[in-house]
Image (tube, rainbow, N blue to C red):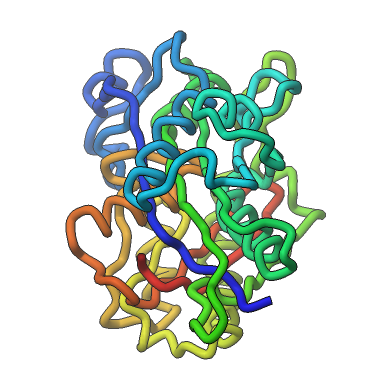
């Protein structure tokens, strides 16, 4: 019942890089048009032989290695994804099989772009309740599988990738490293971001999402900080869902975290849905932009018009 902490983070992106100039050869767009509207320069695209569970397993293996743990040490695997093609075995079970995790509880969490922060909270709750002791929490999406590459309004946005965290139960007397979650949704506006149809295709009402994210979410993000007992100005880092630089920067400014490092990985990776937060967080840690114990707000939002955020301490 003492809470949990993040022991390590890892990420993975496919080798293929698609630039804005590459896209300009596929649809009626340009590097200037894309940068001015969403801030994206490049994105990574997985090949047909790289399923989403493979992306997830690569990121998870890196996180396990960084934590100094073996797959046998894990008893819970949660994968946040909305792009798994198959229904069963689920992505979490396939990741567990790839890594050799014996007998874990293995579940997928589909909350689209807010999936990772939902999954992180769910794992934290399981560890607090004593239902698990060590968890792999992964955000992984292969958005290229659900994208219409002839639609310039969506194909310029997306990328593929994965990020993973190893969560461990805190010993008695240790301060928890994962704060209380603040989560919710606006179900009546769920149509604003969709992955539906046969074959499934990503679509969104960009202006509706932009207005909602820039006007409604700053106050909600501040509430997540309040639940953790951390003022926005005390944050060392802010990792928002990497959807659009024109959403990230105003939201971070309205939050009031003036001295925090703001993740802007969207410029290099595009919108990787559930992967975007752990991917961006892992890169900040990898380059030394954040230090051990630093408080960081993780805040996901998007599909279903769902949101979830918590303040965590860096491993």
Seen at 60% across and 71% down, the residue is 216
Q: Nearer the viewer, residue 265 or 36?
A: 265
Q: Position of residue 191 (x, y in %)?
A: 73, 43
Relative to the observer, which residue lies in front, 294 or 82? 294
Q: Quadrant of the N terminus?
A: bottom right
Q: Quadrant of the C terminus?
A: bottom left
**In percent of the image, x 49 and y 82: which residue is there?**
174
Q: Position of residue 63 (x, y in %)?
A: 39, 46
Q: Residue furthest top?
A: 49
22 lies above or below 125: above
Which residue sits at x=57%, y=58%?
117
Q: Is residue 113 among what the camera can see? A: yes
User: Can you tell which quarter of the image residue 300 is in?
Assistant: bottom right
Report x, y in % for residue 48: 46, 9
Q: Position of residue 163 (x, y in %)?
A: 43, 43
Q: Give the residue at x 75% y 21%.
A: 88
Q: Is residue 35 left or right of residue 59?
A: left
Residue 243 visible within the image: no
């Amino acid at each position: 019942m003492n809470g949990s902490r993040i022991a390590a983070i890892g990420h993975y992106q496919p080798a293929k890089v698609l630039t804005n100039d590459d896209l300009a050869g596929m649809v009626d767009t340009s590097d200037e048009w894309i940068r001015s509207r969403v801030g994206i320069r490049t994105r990574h695209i997985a090949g047909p032989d790289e399923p989403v569970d493979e992306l997830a397993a690569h990121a998870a293996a890196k996180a396990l290695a960084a934590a100094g743990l073996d797959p046998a040490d894990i008893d819970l695997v949660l994968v946040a994804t909305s792009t798994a093609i198959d229904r069963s075995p689920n992505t979490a079970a396939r990741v567990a099989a790839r890594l050799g995790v014996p007998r874990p509880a293995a579940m997928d969490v589909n909350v689209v772009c807010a999936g990772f922060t939902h999954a992180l909270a769910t794992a934290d709750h399981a560890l607090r309740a004593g239902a698990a002791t060590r968890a792999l929490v992964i955000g992984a999406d292969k958005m290229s599988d659900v994208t219409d590459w002839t639609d310039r309004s969506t194909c310029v946005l997306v990328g593929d990738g994965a990020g993973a965290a190893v969560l461990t139960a805190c010993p008695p007397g240790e301060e928890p490293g994962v704060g209380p979650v603040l989560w919710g949704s606006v179900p009546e506006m769920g149509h604003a971001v969709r992955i539906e149809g046969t074959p499934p295709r990503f679509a969104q009402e960009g202006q509706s999402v932009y207005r909602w994210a820039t006007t409604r979410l700053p106050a909600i993000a501040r509430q997540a900080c309040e639940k953790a007992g951390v003022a926005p100005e005390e944050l060392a880092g802010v990792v928002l869902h990497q959807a659009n630089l024109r959403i990230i920067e105003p939201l971070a400014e309205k939050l009031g975290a003036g001295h925090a490092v703001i993740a802007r990985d969207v410029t290099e990776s595009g919108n990787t849905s559930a992967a975007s937060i752990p991917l961006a967080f892992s890169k900040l840690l990898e380059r030394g932009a954040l230090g051990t114990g630093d408080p960081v707000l993780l805040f996901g939002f998007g599909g279903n018009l769902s949101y979830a955020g918590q303040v965590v301490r860096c491993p």
